Image (cartoon, rainbow, N blue to C red):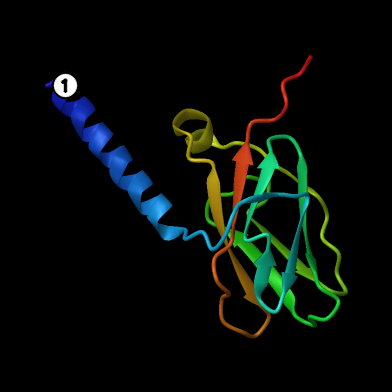
Amino acid sequence: MRNTQRGMIAVLLVAMFSGCSASYKMKGAEKASGVVTIDSCRAEPDTVIVEEGKDLKWQVASTDSHTYTIDFSRSPFAESSTTVGSQAEDKPHKAKKDFWCKVFGACKFAYTLTPQGAPVCPDPGVHVIPGAASP
């Protein structure tokens, strides 16, 4: 009985993670950066690498007049949503690992970019990696 329960839990976890990883499609190489620049509904870098404990912020290119809402269903930050525009600077967000990242290594976090009054943009993501070891 106990082995059956463990097997069911394992199957559920695999199903959950296969759904999570399948929903995010990388569109290029991951790049380490402290800033993601949004221009015409595209995030650069598309998948940003951030060390745990380091800051990340979004900015909108001066040539883009949209205000964007950035939403995470599962967030590597204290907040799951932020709004940024060329006239509204974003504050830094400290990257953290959630339960799924700490325990199972699911450390890629997809988010949506939604320009005010327009459809959702292609899905960029954040990949949280371990921070530098403390001396």
Residue 120 placement (x, y as % from top left): 56, 76
Relative depth, front residue between 20 and 73: 20
Q: Residue at x 53, y 30 (%)?
A: 102
Q: Which image quadrant is residue 51 in?
A: top right
Q: Which residue is mark 1?
A: 3
Q: Residue at x 62, y 61 (%)?
A: 46
Residue 58 placement (x, y as % from top left): 76, 60
Instruction: Please say if 6 is above or below 8.
Output: above
Left or right? Give the position of 21 relative to 91: left
Relative depth, front residue between 130 and 117: 130
Residue 59 placement (x, y as % from top left): 80, 65
Q: Residue at x 62, y 69 (%)?
A: 113
Q: Amino acid at mark 1?
A: Asn
Q: Which image quadrant is residue 119 in?
A: bottom right
Left or right? Give the position of 125 relative to 63: left
Q: Secondary structure at mark 1?
A: helix
Mark count? 1
Outermost bottom residue? 117
Instruction: Please say if 82 is above or below 98.
Output: below
Q: Quadrant of the N terminus?
A: top left
Q: Residue at x 78, y 44 (%)?
A: 55
Q: Residues within 10 Å of mark 1 (few under 14, many from 20)?
A: few
Residue 14 placement (x, y as % from top left): 30, 40
Outermost front residue? 29
Outermost top residue? 135
Left or right? Give the position of 58 relative to 77: right
Outermost left residue? 1
Q: Quadrant of the C terminus?
A: top right
